[in-house]
Image (cartoon, helix red, strand yellow):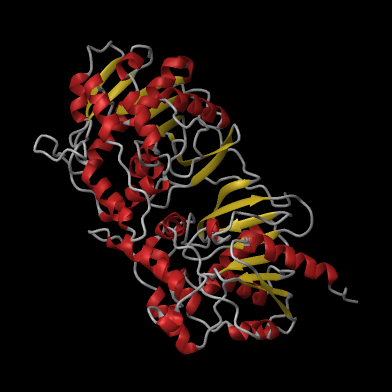
Amino acid sequence: MPFHRWTPSRVSTERTPIPRHFVEVAGRQVHYRRLGAGPPLVMLHASPLSSQSLEERMRPLAARWTVIALDTPGYGRSAPLSNPQPEILDYAIALEKTLQALGLRRVVLYGRHTGACIAVSLAGRLPDRVAAIWCDGYPVLDATARARYLGDYLHTAAPVWDGSHLTWHWYRYREQCIHWPWNVQTAETRADADLPALDELHRGTLDMLTAQPCYTTAYAAAFRFDSLDALAKVSCPVLFAARPGDSLYRAIDALPSLPPYMQVVAVPREAVAASAVECEALERFATGLPAAPNPPSVTAGPAYVRGPYGELALESGGSDDGRPWLLLPPAPGTAGLLDGDAERQRPAGAWLSVDLPGHGHSGPVPPEQHTLAAYAEAIEWVCRELEIREPLLYGSGTGAAVALELALRKRVSPGALALDDLPVLATEARKIWRERLAIELAPSTEGAHLLRAWHQLRDLALWAPARAGRHDAIRLPAWSIEPADLQRRVLPVLLRPEASAAGWRALLAEDLAWRLDVLGVPLVLVSRPDAMLGRVPPGLADRPAAGGHVLQLPLGRSPVAAATASCVAMLSTAPSST
């Protein structure tokens, strides 16, 4: 790869976003969060969530430890295991390999629910690698309970045309905070806990949705796990948190008589006091543990880079041949939307995709940074940071408008542009589109924001935005409204629901026509029937000063692969300048 190697930076424990990372483990990408400095404390989350659920617990612990919170395989952004029905032992073996990849020889493990099962399993297999375990909720199930949970707890809802499966997951996750188990609503099962805030409910629901089809795998493994038999094989210190309000609080009573190196620790209900107890209880295990090494550097695949524009999500690949491609996806959305409904394809040469600031997997940014100019500044910074010179630019939707902005700013000196789904509209049309598309998706009590996002995308497939609902605006053929395809499109939007309207406003705030009029860079415009914002208007490619070419694509073909190949071919046949 021609891109400069980057090494994740260390940040303070203040209220800044916690840095995220990837590490490759046996050909599989593992995603994790990391904060602090000192000996390693590895955190394992509960099912069906991700490491984001542990962020508030990471911050106080990071004053003493290097806290590393992993996404369990198949959850968050970690790739699943190849075994379609893994057991807790399989997750423990995967954890062992991850610790090796991170250079961690001996650690303290902090496991919550399913994570506690994985921690205990690993400690039983490799006692020399685990100094101690903090179990924040340890399931103890008899045969009857195990059969009941495996039989009727692990329900899910497949995508359906009206989006009601989204609100089903919203209330399913909400209900497990009200009753435990969630599917038995009685006075005896009522949870002794506060209902999470709306943002937390949204993140938990999204974790469930993005874990599909792996949502039930770690859950089911935990229900099959013989936790008492596994505990009997552990020789390191184990602390069991007795935390009021936790769904497994009563499981403490099912523990057998414990050896001296295992004990129950009473944890207060209030979060700050609970953190103080955790920090104090774990402090004695830090002595003698070596400090965690720096995170491994990343040269290809998914990664993050941090700087003045927050944390930006990247992915890179391809060969070293020719100029690199810089791929800019729609906003709202992620690089996963670059191919439309077609199978994912990337340019033949080196390439780098960047989720725009505040969107997709990139970190949040202040409201004033949701402009085309600010997005372009962030991409220019990425090019400087990674030493990317004179790239070829491909953009879709808002990414296409940002690519156009970059070409006019001339700081990255692009050799050519390939633009897909670029809305070149008159002032009145932009106003109408903004009214229809820039809708607020902040989490709501009823989960209605999920339905708003779903039907916004579905309606875009059915009608042209400016005249939605009218017979003369029907779009045929449209991009797919199959529920599975809509699900693939809506989840990237819901990663940053607070930025959805801002992304649309950034795209539709400015006239793009004059930018094409003065563009002095070779241009390929993609026109396809399944483009979200419509086909290329007639005559648009004739406007650039450098000349343009319209690439007509059939349904189902990747615009990325076709447009980048067309661009390379156009450059190879262009007369050389003298």
Q: Is residue 282 visible?
A: no
Going by the picture, which residue comes out furthest to the right? 578
Q: Which image quarter is the C terminus in?
A: bottom right
Q: Is residue 499 above or below residue 74?
A: below
* Total numbered labels: 0
Residue depicted at 69% across the width and 67% down the height = 412
Residue depicted at 20% across the width and 39% down the height = 183
Q: Is residue 536 above or below residue 262?
A: below
The residue closer to the viewer here, 212 or 91, is: 212
Q: Is residue 355 above or below residue 240?
A: below
The spot of residue 558 in percent (x, y) is: 62, 60
Q: Is residue 310 visible?
A: yes
The residue closer to the viewer here, 209 or 292, is: 209
In the rendered structure, the answer to whether residue 141 lies left or right of residue 316 reads left
Going by the picture, which residue comes out furthest to the left? 187
In the rendered structure, the answer to whether residue 330 lies left or right of residue 175 reads right
The spot of residue 94 in percent (x, y) is: 50, 28
In the rendered structure, the answer to whether residue 504 lies left or right of residue 260 reads right
In the rendered structure, the answer to whether residue 558 lies left or right of residue 430 reads right
Residue depicted at 53% across the width and 84% down the height = 425
Picture quarter containing residue 246? top left
Residue depicted at 51% across the width and 40% down the height = 79
